[in-house]
Image (tube, coloured by chain):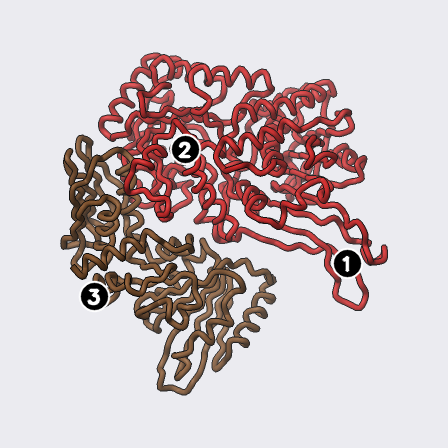
Chain colours: A brown, B red
Amino acid sequence: MTSFMLSDTTASKISAQLTHLRHQMGSPAVGMVLTLVVVCDEGEQYDAVRAATEAAREHPSRILVVIGRDPAEPNRLDAELRVGESTPGEVILLRLYGELTEHADSVVSPLLLTDTPVVVWWPRHSPDVPAKDSVGVLAQRRIVDARPAAEPVKAIAGRARSYVPGDTDLAWTRLTPWRSLLAAAFDQPVGKVKKGVVEAAAGHPSAPLLAAWLGERLGAPVKVADSPGPGLTRVTLSTAAGDVTITRSDARLATLSRPGQPDRQVALARRPTSELIAEELRRLDPDEVYEAAIRRVARSHKG
Amino acid sequence: MTEGSPGTTGTAGKTRAGGTAVTAVTGSAEESASVAASVATTAITEAAVAANPLRDPRDKRLPRVAGPCVLVLFGVTGDLARKKLLPAIYDLANRGLLPPGFSLVGFARREWRDQDFAQLTYDAVKQHARTPFREEVWKQLSEGIFFCPGEFTDDGAFDALAMMLKEIDETRGTGGNYGFYLSVPPKFFPVVVQQLKRTDLAHGPEGAWRRVVIEKPFGHDLKSAHELNAITSAVFPESSVFRIDHYLGKETVQNILALRFANNLFEPIWNRGYVDHVQITMAEDIGIGGRAGYYDGIGAARDVIQNHLLQLLALVGMEDPTSFDADSLRREKEKVLKAVQLPQDLARSTARGRYATGWQGGQPVVGYAQEEGIPSDSITETYAAIKLEIANRRWAGVPFYLRTGKRLGRRVTEVAVVFQKAPHLPFSKDDTEILGHNALVVRVQPDEGITVRFGSKVPGTAMEVRDVSMDFAYGESFMESSPEAYERLLLDVMIGDPPLFPHQREVELSWKILDPIEEFWASQGVPEDYPAGSWGPASADEMMARDGRVWRRL
């Protein structure tokens, strides 16, 4: 891996340096398919970059990491360029000082890959309306995460108000294996579901989302209940013939039980952030199913 | 041995993904699944999708998951099972694509119990799986691993198998859906298929499916292909027979369809008006290894051209299908295979050879005739090149050159569409002296990708034009996350989605193309020798030279 530091620099100098590095490595072709912008602070940077580079193995990307530093300092842009073997694409860490912290878009915009999709990811602190954020407005897809929020469930409920097609939340992405397993369980006729319960660690934002999705699709009331965790622990759907349940207490292996059939064990491990990001990058079109789920959460949260 | 089949290196047959074009392929394949839903009558999953309130076509995150089923594997101790099939099953489970309750039954002539087969699977997974080993996935899979010992001729063993499957239906909720994977030599097909019929395993009750999966070779000529088909079709309907040509499961091969039909850039020039000729190559650097018994009497053309290369020809040459469901796709492939014409003079438009002792990649290797188990009077070819024409409006007069060989310079499979020279060059003859033909090359393996070759000005004061290459590579590091051909194909079998499997009609059409050539060759005695590590016999180069063309140097 080649790493290169530029201090007190500009976007055009970074761009020139990138071209130079690529030529030096003998591969001037750009095979990258998208730009992933990560907006975070210094403390979150390491984990976020790690997850993004892992995800880039599936989606070769230019990763721009925007790190806001002290706004009281004089204006200044520092950049760290990483190009090379361990990362299929390019990673550019941008450190913004002074008033520039308010104008990150002026640095990001010239560094986006030409004519390819742009995705923005806020690992922790996300703007109230991602689509109206100065960086967010550059992107087709905007990824936020309700889990680290102070009040995760409230955060999810608030998403519906600011929703613009292209918004997505990792709290929803985390549910895909659960939803996939539930859908597989329903591939065999189950009968009309009368009611359901989703149990999870208190305040887990994925739980109301899963309940909303099930309620929306099954046309039945689905409640959320607290459990010791970790994460989601159980989904119970009651039918006339009995309960269909998926239970997972160790965050790894789940048990599927349904009326008239023996219990079966299914792998249902929690996934690392890199896999969540890779899933998000796989489809860049608006997720209407997510929209329906957050709208339902918002309705029931008010009521 | 063909590339990508077991016994070659671990990376053989690995496909890579990444890049927009690939996303497009998976996208359309998944969409076609819903189209196919209306067509398929055997697939319970697809019927169930409509009835399942949790499935929504807009919900693209949910993967296509196979319905509850049992996969019965005949020939579990073979190389293919250990190196490809069992790891692929684990990888599917790891990606969450196998249904809860999925069960795997091994059948072989071993005094084994379930745990012995589980151990074999465990070792195979540990050694060859693509995705990381995870204890919880293994736990899910191992719960559903069973073994049924017995001989194929032993009625009792198959009765026991039928009982076992019935029991699995009850204990694991697999709903009577069985796939039978015959990973055994074709000579055992009749007895296994008859046993399945006798025990009534070939026909499921209402609402359940039974499918049989067979591997190439699908016969060694038209007649034997007929006979082989008669055996399976007497028991299974054609829609339940899945013929695996693992090449069709490769991302790059599927990408030919995306390249051609998802873009507007290539299709207008994809015809006789612009294309000079097409070269389809599958070169291997390995010899026949320990497979003398299989290979001698079969030869390069039957082993590779009949299936892989003619399928590639069909994908490159076919018209656009009305949709990507199995019916439309196969119909177009059949049409183009039917339009294939053999040249009048087979002596001048085919070539064959056999590798002689020589040096391959820095190592001395023995010739074919000296390989262990090859009879001294063998006339089997290890290199075959043929020229074909496609008699339709799009391709009339455009030759398709197909070549394959063992112990060639290096391992490469590619399809090269070579374009005509520009009709008029406003440059002087000297300026364009070294300018070749434009070419579009689909690299199937290794180093998957697409290359476009065109002329470009050499920097300087003179107007000199030279060939340059523009390259799209699927990339070096994405391979670990992109599925193996067998994963895709096994999943398609369980889902009941047949577009990537050749129909019996395609198999028969391919033999119709190859049989006259094989007949001619049979009368020509011993093939011409070529040194191991070279690019084939001189006669192959002469065949091209007669047409004023040359093989691409690979």
The answer to whether dots 1 and 3 both sit on one chain is: no
Position above or below: A276 against B43:
below
Q: Distance between the residues labelled 1 and 3?
A: 65 Å
Residue B331's spot in the image, x, y percent? 55, 30
- Tag 2 subunit: B
Residue A278 image-quadrant placement: bottom left
- Tag 1 subunit: B
**Residue at figure coordinates x 55%, y 47% from the top left:** B262
The amino acid type, in three-letter code, at marker 1 is: Val
Residue holding disc 2 = B38
Asked whether residue B181 appears in the rendered view, the answer is: yes
Residue holding disc 3 = A151
- Tag 3 subunit: A
The amino acid type, in three-letter code, at marker 2 is: Ser
Position above or below: B110 against B11:
above
Instruction: Say left or right for B69 vs A240.
Output: right
Q: Are marks 2 and 1 in contact (CB under 8 Å)?
A: no
The amino acid type, in three-letter code, at marker 3 is: Glu
- Label 2 neighbourhood size at 10 Å, few (<14), some (14-19), many (20+)? few
Considering depth in this image, is A190 or B491 the residue closer to the camera? Answer: A190
Q: Do the residues labelled 1 and 3 touch (CB within 8 Å)?
A: no
Considering depth in this image, is A172 or B272 the residue closer to the camera? Answer: B272
Instruction: Say left or right for A259 vs B349.
Output: left
Residue B419's spot in the image, x, y percent? 72, 45
The quarter of the image holding the C terminus of chain B is: top right
The answer to whether dots 2 and 1 both sit on one chain is: yes
